[in-house]
Amino acid sequence: MTAKKPQTITTGADPRLAGGRLTVDLDVLAANWLFLAEKSKPAEASAVVKADAYGLGIVHVVPVLWQAGCRTFFVALAEEGLRVKAVAPDARVFVLNGFFAEAFGAYGQSDLIPVLGSVHELDLWKRLNARRKEKLPFALHVDTGMNRLGLTLEEALVFAADMRGQKPVLLMTHLATADDQAHGLNLKQIESFQKLRGAFAGIESSIANSPGIFHTRIGEYELSRPGVAMYGGEPFSATANPMRPVVTLEARIVQIRTGAKGETVGYGATTTLKRDTRIAVCSVGYADGYLRSASGSGVPLRGAVPNGGEGFVAGSKVPIIGRVTMDLTSFDVTDLPVDAVSPGDYIELFGRNIALDDAARAAGTIGYELLTSLGTRYHRRYLKSESN
């Protein structure tokens, strides 16, 4: 058997100068995709790599997924599609966020496929495509309950009855409540999509996003679209996460100081110390995508979600104290042994010990936002194994 050698690719800020580090395990990313691909069978699994692969970098993520067997990718913008093509020239790439006339040339030159979601876009595409000897392919997005992008059911059925050479290569819809398996809208959307598939017989179809892949009643389709679960996010908030963590975010401790009982901490003096408190001040803040709403106090969210975010250091979880600021966040390390942490040590913000989605919930948001908000000041490490 061929031995595997660990590889580390580093980008971003110089580790000697950076206030934090971001570690991405590309082997785990590939394993997560393979797990979702197996769950998707008999459908093919694609990969959603919009927002620069959910903040992790198209240039790093796409080649690993291609090597794992992924051949179809979804992006939001044509510009992102070009970046996918730069590292995976033979990939099939669909562009989700609408079509504009001035982008037509880019589709023809780069073999990108637009996802058309309105009668206006269909008419525009037909008119521009008519000038070409070889017609360019497109996908059709139908709204079955999201009320966002997509033709209405009625518009789609009218189009199906009179396609006139505009036959799409893919029919898709998007589930609005797939992360809540008990929600009644799921079945309504699934039934509407099955009706559509009958009208668009013989055309590849796609309905399942990350949580949709786990739905037992979703029916047959040909292409799934895993996104956040591939990056380690939870498909459902009410059950244990079957996915492995891909991303670890850590911040460097700048200073450890002691605040006396009765003193206050941070902007707004929102935390009054109830005991003499050792405070680890770390080089991370909302300028790095570590959200201000994760503050331990002094933000409106704390009225609805009593506890702010946590860090993990020296084998223990430690709470954020005071407000997360632009460049600095403080943690209460009083309960750790005095010599357990020192300036220069790293505190984990999410990763193996603090789940991405737990960190997000403490900030009143979702894992998607934390990942796609990651800033540019981190030292980034991409871990992968490579055959000899």
Image (cartoon, helix red, strand yellow):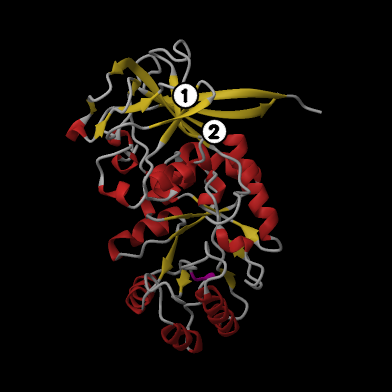
Q: Position of residue 29 (x, y in %)?
A: 58, 41
Q: Is residue 251 left or right of residue 226?
A: left
Q: Position of residue 164 (x, y in %)?
A: 47, 84
Seen as rendered, the residue at the extreme right is 1
First in residue order: circle 2 vs circle 1:
1
98 up-or-down from 37: above or below? below
Q: Residues within 10 Å of mark 1 (few under 14, many from 20)?
A: some
Q: Residues within 10 Å of mark 2 (few under 14, many from 20)?
A: some
Q: Is-magenta flag for residue 172?
A: yes
Residue receiving disc 1? 10
Task: Give the residues in magenta.
Answer: 169-173
In which image quadrant can residue 99 be found? bottom left
Visible in this render: residue 21?
yes
Residue receiving disc 2? 353
**Which corner quadrant holds the C terminus?**
top right
Viewer-side residue, 170 vs 280: 280
